[in-house]
Amino acid sequence: MKKLILIILPLFPLFISCQNQLQNVNYNGVSVKIPTNWGNKNTINHYSEDNISEYQISCWSKENSSSLMIQWVDYEIEDVLYIKLMIETQIERFPMFSQLDFDNIIDIDFQDIKAKKCHFKGFFDNEVFEGEYIAFTKNHNSYIIMIAGNKNFYKSNVYSAILNSIKPNFSKNKIDSENQVKIIDTDTNFTRYEFKDYSLSIPKTMELRNENSMMSLGKAIVKDKIINTKKIDIGDFNFVFQPVGSDDVQDLERQKKALALYARILIQYQKGRIGDFFVWDEDITYTQDEFNQLNKSFKDNILSEAVQIKELNSKIIEIDDIEIKKNDNKIVYIKQLYIRKGFNGDVKVIDYYLYNNDEAVKLTISYRLSEKNLWEKDFDKIIDTFSFNSKK
């Protein structure tokens, strides 16, 4: 029972708010210091047709509109063009950017590097939103930084500290795309996602929700064709997949249809210590009394979450007994299925708890029962595609 304590407790507690302390974020040779009460996500997209890799560090405050993006490509882009393309892309994707005023692009020195800067300002959520883009090229890599926030953040000591802490990858320590981004043979209806510590395949009817990051590259830089494998590293972040089109602000009719559906795939990762969890392929055996106790613990946990999480609407209709199984990759997991009341119909939820000695993943799959014909067949295959990158 000891090995299950960590994964049953709520995952990912919020960072303690501390405005005066900074945490380090490092990704592919680029580093920055951000406040400890910020979240971050690191991504890489590889565009196979052009053999270009795009890297990004996205950081955001959990309390207000303050955010930072550092994006770089292994390709030389003229600084002014990079800024203009980023502005155009973000106006297309995020309506709030169309309400901002952008100043002329000017020459600056950024950490003794010749760079270009564009200041912007406007109103967002009834307050002043202000920031700047900074673009430069070094060692055949092109970089762009976007930093912005409310009037208390803009040009504050924290704002300056973040900018001054940025250390770009001048050594051009490029990730080997062939080794790091692999296309794995799967059903043609699936896309393979390779995270830092694990990988799995997701139906192409679902898209990765990306509400907290400014991730895109202008059409003039790369073509739209992207390979079906995305390499993603995580900081303090829970990944959510939703019906394709849910974020499509360019096609409102398509977005409306996607938002009318309800289906979610949530991935949560927890790092522990050696021995905290089951070994990845462990054969688990319990006496009937031990199983009953474990089963009760999982059910009690679901009922407790229902009280705390508004999305569950505080009403569980049915909870099945847990199942202990192994997937096609021999990864041991515990399955918990239940039915909850939804706002527009009952929702089926399946929690999979997967273990690997000092790490665990909670994979949650849910969909509206009235729409199970759209999701059930493909969603049932997901668990068998899961694998830890290093089996322990």
Image (tube, rainbow, N blue to C red):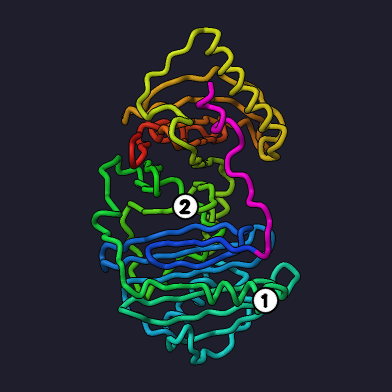
Q: Nearer the viewer, residue 299 or 221?
A: 299
SS for dot 1: loop
* Residue at the right extreme, as displayed: 126
The residue indicated by pointer 2 is 234
Q: Amino acid at mark 1?
A: Ser
Q: Nearer the viewer, residue 221 or 236?
A: 236
In the rendering, at what x and y percent does residue 326 appear? Answer: 37, 24
| Circle nearer the viewer, 1 or 2 | 1
Question: Can the viewer see residue 336 in this picture?
Answer: yes
Q: Is residue 62 left or right of residue 369?
A: right
Q: Quadrant of the C terminus?
A: top left
Q: Is residue 391 left or right of residue 359?
A: left
In the rendering, at what x and y percent does residue 198 appear? Answer: 38, 42
Question: Can the viewer see residue 242 in this picture?
Answer: no
Q: Amino acid at mark 2?
A: Ile
Please give the name of the residue rendered at 58% of the width and 44% of the height, measured from the top-left corner: 12
Please give the name of the residue rendered at 63% of the width and 63% of the height, measured from the top-left corner: 21
In the rendering, at what x and y percent does residue 320 appear? Answer: 56, 19
